[in-house]
Amino acid sequence: MRAYQSLIALAFALCASCIGPHGEQQPLRALFVGNSLTYVGNLPAVFSVLSSANGHAVTSDMIVRGGATLSQRVADGSVERAFAEQKYALLVLQERGGDLICSFGPSSCVESQQAIQTLSSLGRKNGAAVVLLGTYQTNPIVSGQLVEKESAAAKAAGIPYVEMSEALQTLRRSAPALEWFYHDGNHPGNALVLLDAVLLYKQLFGAYPSATGFAVNAPIYTNESGLTETLRAADAPPPRPETPPAISYATDTIQKVIAGLRKQEGS
């Protein structure tokens, strides 16, 4: 893991040293590929702002659609086209929840594993670091099974795995009052989106971000987003004008998330 973090840090340093045509410093570009677990609460935008607030300028794009699988993104060539259009330093993959534990039938496991390997190879071929961001299950037994399968899929693809289901189990106990789930009880709430962003940050930079509040001025998507698999910037105008335009994360919330993760590390 340390070796991979060193490569990531080098990629970020090289990107930060790139100078644009007018002498401005160029941020690192990240591409998120996933589904409603990725876009509800706009994880790509939250990650960009969190990273930028901690001295790592990041801009994020996304290819997302509700209920989408990574195998669909392989089949339609959307990720390959995105790399042809942009130079990405980071590719974040997130599968539909349950695919890797065969929740949608035995073939879903195989297709998911193959897609992760294909997209990982595509990212590396184009010079990007690739990570698999985990999904979650609220049942403790199923959560453990999910982490095992996701970890194995990432290992087979030769990429790091950002585990979050067991982290969520811990944080729900240590900070039960935080908004872990959207009001439908299934999709990520604001605290869970923050947890994802903090875990990604820790994976990439090797340390937790500062526990300082920040504001995200980007569409904060709900489960009814209107998004399709069209490549879009995380802060682009939303398809539906009623989408909330921003969110603020308080210092106290960030402190609780980081404290819970430190507690998990020490357990």
Image: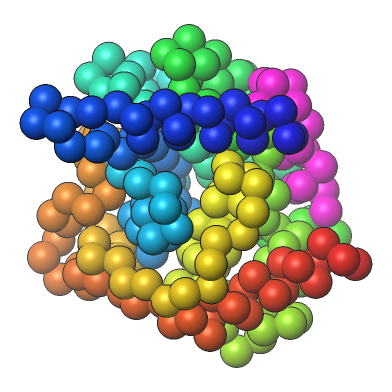
Residue at 27%, 14% (x, y): give it: 84
Picture residue at 47% right of the left edge, 74% below the top: 212
Front residue (pair 53, 67): 53
Question: Is residue 21 found left or right of 70 in the rendered image?
Answer: left
Residue 134 seen by the camera: no
Q: Quadrant of residue 174?
A: bottom right
In the picture provided, is 55 more to the left or to the right than 247? right
Q: Give the magenta-colored segment's residue range.
A: 144-159
Residue at image position (45%, 58%) is 54
Task: Indicate whether 115 appears above or below 59.
Answer: above
In the rendered image, which quarter contains the N terminus?
top right
State whether residue 259 is above or below residue 151: below
Look at the picture and state if 214 lies above or below 34: below
- How many dots with numbers? 0
The kind of secondary structure the magenta stretch mainly shows is helix
Where is residue 177? Give x, y as percent. Answer: 60, 89
Q: In which quadrant of the rendered view does residue 61 lie?
A: top left
